[in-house]
Amino acid sequence: MEVSAMQNCKNADPLWNDLKIYNAVVCEGSLSGASRRLSISHSTVCRRISRLEDIVGVPLIRRRSNGIAFTKNGEQLGGFVREMDERANDIMFWIKQKKDDLAGVLSLSCCDIALQSLSRIVGDLSVSNPGIQFDIKVSAMNADLRLASTDLAIRATTSPDESLVGVKLSHFQFQLAKCAGVNSPSHANWICLNDAFSHLPAERWLGEQKSESQSQIKVDSYMSAAELIRTGTGIGLLPDFVVENDPYLEAIDVEETLPTWDLWLVYHRSQINNGLVKAFTNHLKSHWCENQSIPLPPEVSSTDLSWQK
């Protein structure tokens, strides 16, 4: 009876997917970090690493109470898979550079506060170009555009990566928000983002204002925070266009200057001539103003969304 490579790991060649998972473990320094990086379960990471160890025939990591440690063989393989991953990424960018037709998958990363405007633009473009398939990932975390897995990103930032090509779509200020029509007691819960976002200006401002007696409810996105604030669960900072366009939210007057942010569309420089990227960016420049609920900054008009390289 024929025995497949999956059934007989001792005689199998290492599978690229297993090596990609091992590379994620190397990059993150932990099994749980690799799980988050790849959006797969912790048990899957453990199972695939064990299978890879069976294939190569030597231990690659040692599990300890405070994490993992790489064996000498594990460190050597880690160097190899990093190089393989970089070359594979270069190949994917090279392939995308050559693509000039309007068919295939366009991968977009979008911060949650821009999803409503983006969805309208994507809907319009998909009608006029049915050959384009959209893969949209919504996250408050910035996608790494050095990786070919994401083509474009709409992100909130005040300092976009200068190595990328991009355009500033809008400028906005945060407002301290509460549930409309509800008094906001001084001891109200603070609704804030979790510790992964503690470096952001809005979260630093909240940290400075919160008294020791006030409790916090931490979430992973501003839209989640908005939902809790709508129900009267607490108060928190939200983009001004979210508060002003929601009848269930109301701004609280504060004397302090509140943080501001910009929305940018960005992508890797190697994709300037990619057909799908060009089609999307041209469509966005033509339709962002008329479809968005987010106002453009005063210095940018609907006919002059100039690219800033």
Image (cartoon, rainbow, N blue to C red):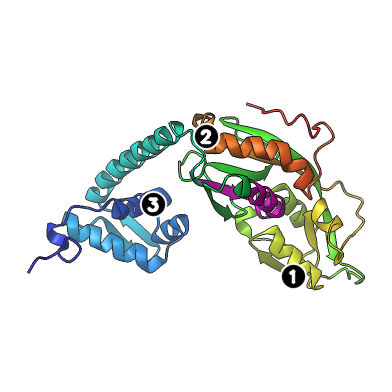
> Is label 1 or label 2 in front?
2
Percent coordinates x, y for residue 24 in the rendering: 39, 51
Q: Residues in magenta? A: 106-124
Q: What element carries label 1?
A: loop
Mark linked to residue 109: none
Q: Do the residues labelled 3 and 1 touch (CB within 8 Å)?
A: no
Q: Can residue 17 be seen in this view?
A: yes
Q: Which amino acid does label 1 sit on?
A: Ser
Question: Is residue 114 one of those drawn in magenta?
Answer: yes
> Is label 3 or label 1 in front?
3
- Reading the image, the residue beneath label 3 is 24
Q: Which of marks 2 and 3 is nearer the N terminus?
A: 3
Q: Which amino acid does label 3 sit on?
A: Ala
Residue, x 32% and y 38% (percent of image)? Answer: 83
Residue, x 39% and y 35% (percent of image)? Answer: 90
Mark linked to residue 275: 2
For marks 2 and 3, give the CA distance.
30 Å
Percent coordinates x, y for residue 214 in the rendering: 78, 68
Q: Which picture quadrant has residue 79?
A: top left
Which residue is more in the foreground, 197 or 87? Answer: 87
Is residue 119 placed above or below 157 in the rendered structure?
A: below
For marks 1 and 2, give the CA distance.
50 Å
